Amino acid sequence: MKTIYPVLFLILLLTFSCTGGKRTQANENTIDSLVINSERITNSLGEMLSPDAKEELSAWKEYNDVDEFVIAYYNISVTEALNNADELEGLVKLMKDSIRIESLKKYDVIARFNVLHNETLRLADMATITSISDEEVIKEVTQILELYSAVNSKINTIYRAIELQNLLEVDTETPIELEGEKLNEMKREIRGLKKQ
């Protein structure tokens, strides 16, 4: 009787250990059948703000929110891009509607903000379409990033122009009126140069 217990124990142990391997193998097949789309949208960083422009825009919360959110779109999956499209569109709309800086309240800057907002609206609409292809989403995300880079480029250009304006001793915004005598003197010099 004493020898039967160890033998029965060994038989039970071998039986359970052999059937456990089959369960593990079945689970491995199930796990392998899950396919995750690992295709990511990767873009190189576009134009960022210059230090002068960044300093001027530091108090504009809506722009900084969009800037932080857009950075994620430089390396994002198609699914994540579509899931975050509504939030991106909302942030861009807030930014577009809250331009607080006087130097940016120009038609050419506002037009760029409007185009960027329209493209984010398009991406948000793509999220609701079930038959949209990955290529279309990739193209739209790339276009949004290019437009965001164009907005930054325009802002940088504005602040570079302001910086150059400040470096000049003469105010180029208001025309200079020359005195009559100086004007006549300059005309004589020009005529003298033409005769030579």
Image (tube, rainbow, N blue to C red):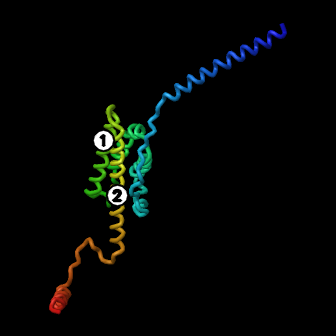
In the image, 176: left or right of 97?
A: left
Crowding at dot 1, Cα within 10 Å, few <14 / some 14-19 / many 20+, comes out as some
* Residue 167 coordinates in the image, percent (x, y): 36, 74
Q: Residue at x 31, y 37 (%)?
A: 125
Q: Residue at x 33, y 53 (%)?
A: 99
Q: Is residue 65 visible?
A: no
Q: Residue at x 33, y 31 (%)?
A: 130
Of 64 and 76, the residue lying toward us = 76
Vertical placement of 8 versus 119: above or below?
Answer: above
**Badge 2 or badge 1: first in the primary sequence:** 2
* Residue 14 coordinates in the image, percent (x, y): 71, 17
* Residue 45 coordinates in the image, percent (x, y): 42, 54
Residue at the farthest top position: 1
Residue type pointed to by label 2: Ile
Q: For residue 163, what is the image quadrant?
A: bottom left
Of 81 and 106, the residue lying toward us = 81
Vertical placement of 183 versus 110: above or below?
Answer: below
Residue at the farthest right position: 2
In the image, 189: left or right of 89?
A: left
Of circles 2 and 1, the one toward us is: 1
Q: Is residue 148 visible?
A: yes
Secondary-structure class at tag 2: loop
Secondary-structure class at tag 1: helix
Q: Which residue is mark 2?
A: 101
In the image, 103: left or right of 67?
A: left
Q: Which residue is mark 1?
A: 122
Q: Residue at x 35, y 36 (%)?
A: 127
In the image, 156: left or right of 2?
A: left
Quadrant occupied by the C terminus:
bottom left
